[in-house]
Image: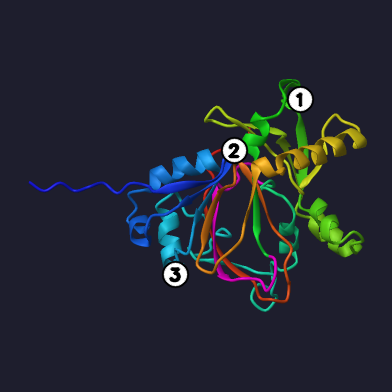
Amino acid sequence: MSVTEKTRLVHEEVKPKIGSRVLNTKEELLAGTLGSEIRELLEQRGVLVFPSVNFTNEEQVAFTKTLGTFAPERKGDPEEISKITIDVKENPAAAEYLKGSLYWHIDGTMNDVPILASLLSCHKKAAWGGNTGFCNTYAAWEELPEDRKAELDGLRAIHGVWPTVFYYDPEPSLAKLKGMQGVGENELPLVWKHKNGRKSLVIGCTTLRVLDKTDGESAQIIHGLREWATQDDFSYSHEWTVGDLVIWDNTGTMHRAEQYDLDSGRMMHRTKLEGEEPFA
């Protein structure tokens, strides 16, 4: 009688409070049998690195589908790779918008249900810089002093795309400002109570103000929490090698592209998983 040995998920810790490297082969990952274990590890660790896995576009899409429901970039779009680059020749529509990605944020703060996760693969490195930074907003919340948690729990904040403009263009034109403001605003909890029983912080460069606080108090809360959440214990900066794939839990981390040569043609390919849980 033959016995088929079950493929096990092979991984190692990157840092104590964030990140794991997954060391399985491409073939094992594409088989689909590890999907549920990868999802569990992603929730626990926030960020998963698949070093030099060298997925093709088709393989990245297929792997994404083993983890959940593939999320198209825009409604009605086919299931395809999104090119993430500031090169206007490659991505003219998003080049300006993506400048905001250089600052700490959570994707989807303008939606009631944000995406679950993003999968990013490196196809061309920047000439210098270009790491992607991550921080664990679950761990950041859990490590706050209890009296600080009591002060923050229950607060709500207004988010928008337009506050991000001032991070990279302190004196924007009125036309640019109005265009960004046209996207609208969204009210979200400052502390997200998840269905898994854990809590995480909902902050980043889209956060405009905290409700029922003065402007000064609001700014101190927003920027103080960002400073706390992005400290070394809770954060990880991934230095890319061409062929790497990284997944991050968008519901329990913030991320940012770190400064790099904007003329170097840095090219990343992204797929996403549809959200499964509303902000609450």
Residues drawn in magenta: 111-129
Which residue does the numbered mark 3 point to in the structure image? 56
Check the picture and name the quadrant holding the C terminus.
Answer: top right
Which class describes the residues within 10 Å of circle 2: few (<14), some (14-19), or many (20+)? Answer: some
> Could you tell me residue 266's position as x and y percent?
64, 71
Q: CA separation, marks 2 and 3?
A: 32 Å
Q: Which of marks 3 and 1 is in front?
A: 1
The vertical placement of 85 against 258, above or below, is below
Tag 3–tag 1 contact (CB < 8 Å): no
Nearer to the camera, 17 or 208: 17
Secondary structure type for disc 2: loop
Q: What residue type is labelled 1?
A: Arg
Q: Residue 278 carries which label?
A: 2
x and y, in percent, of residue 51 in the image: 48, 60
Q: What residue type is labelled 2?
A: Pro
- The CA distance from mark 3 to mark 1 is 46 Å
Identify whether 114 is placed above or below 71. above
Numbered disc 1: secondary structure: helix
Furthest residue to the bottom?
89
